[in-house]
Image (spheres, rainbow, N blue to C red):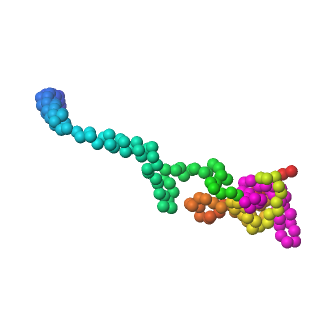
C-alpha cells in the first residue's frame, strides 16, 4: 500500500514539473534562434575558397615529398602479386636474370670437383649451376642428390633472416 502511494506522488510530481521544464527548453531554443537571426554570416570569401580548391584540383599545385619515407597513401600490398615486374629494372640475360621460381631442376651430377645441377630456364635453355651460383633474386646454397636449396632474398623486414630457403626437387621424367 505504501509503495502505491509513493508511485502516485511521483506521477503527480512529474505531471507538474514536466510542463515547466519543457517551457524552459522552448524559451532557450527561441532565444538561440533569435541570436542566430541577428548575426550576419560573412559569405564573401566562400567563392574565393572554392576557386582555390578548384585550382588545386586542376593544377599539380600540391606535391608529396617523401624524404626517404614510403608514401602513406599507397597500399603495402602493391607489388606482391607480380614480383618480377620491378619498375625501371632490366634483368641481365641468362642465368643471372632468372628468378628461382622460373627455373626447373632437370638433373644432378656428382663430379670429383663437386656436385652440379642442370636446370631449365624460362628461355628454354639448360644451365649448369653449382653452390654459390647467383640468380636474380637469390643464390644456390646447397645441392643434394635429389634437390637444390636456394637462398632467396627476403623483402619482409620483419623476418629474422634476410633470406628465405627455397627447395626445388629434381623434376620427374
Q: Would residue 112 be counted in the magenta stretch? A: yes
Left or right of 49 on screen, residue 103 = right
Question: Front-most of 145 and 86?
Answer: 86
> Picture coordinates of residue 151 (x, y %)?
69, 63
Residue depicted at 67% across the width and 53% down the height: 84
- The number of numbered discs placed on residues in the rendered structure image is 0
Q: Is residue 142 above or below residue 122?
A: below
Question: Front-most of 138 and 94?
Answer: 94
Left or right of 118 on screen, residue 31 = left
Residue depicted at 19% across the width and 38% down the height: 40
Q: Quadrant of residue 99?
A: bottom right
Q: Is residue 54 above or below residue 142?
A: above
Q: Is residue 112 above or below residue 164?
A: below
Magenta part of the protein: which range? 92-121
Q: Quadrant of residue 153?
A: bottom right
> Picture coordinates of residue 49 (x, y %)?
33, 43
Amino acid at each position: 500500500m505504501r509503495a502505491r502511494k509513493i508511485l502516485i506522488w511521483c506521477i503527480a510530481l512529474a505531471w507538474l514539473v514536466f510542463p515547466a521544464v519543457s517551457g524552459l527548453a522552448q524559451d532557450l531554443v527561441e532565444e538561440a534562434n533569435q541570436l542566430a537571426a541577428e548575426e550576419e554570416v560573412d559569405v564573401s570569401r566562400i567563392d574565393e575558397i572554392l576557386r582555390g580548391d578548384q585550382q588545386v584540383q586542376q593544377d599539380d599545385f600540391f606535391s608529396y615529398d617523401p624524404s626517404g619515407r614510403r608514401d602513406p597513401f599507397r597500399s603495402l600490398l602493391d607489388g606482391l602479386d607480380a614480383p618480377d615486374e620491378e619498375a625501371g629494372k632490366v634483368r641481365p640475360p641468362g642465368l643471372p636474370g632468372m628468378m628461382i621460381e622460373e627455373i626447373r631442376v632437370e638433373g644432378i651430377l656428382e663430379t670429383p670437383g663437386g656436385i652440379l645441377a642442370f636446370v631449365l630456364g624460362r628461355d628454354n635453355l639448360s644451365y649448369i649451376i653449382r653452390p654459390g651460383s647467383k640468380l636474380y633474386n637469390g643464390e644456390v646454397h646447397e645441392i643434394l642428390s635429389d634437390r637444390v636449396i636456394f637462398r632467396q632474398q627476403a623483402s619482409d623486414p620483419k623476418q629474422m633472416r634476410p633470406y628465405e630457403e627455397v627447395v626445388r626437387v629434381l623434376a620427374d621424367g
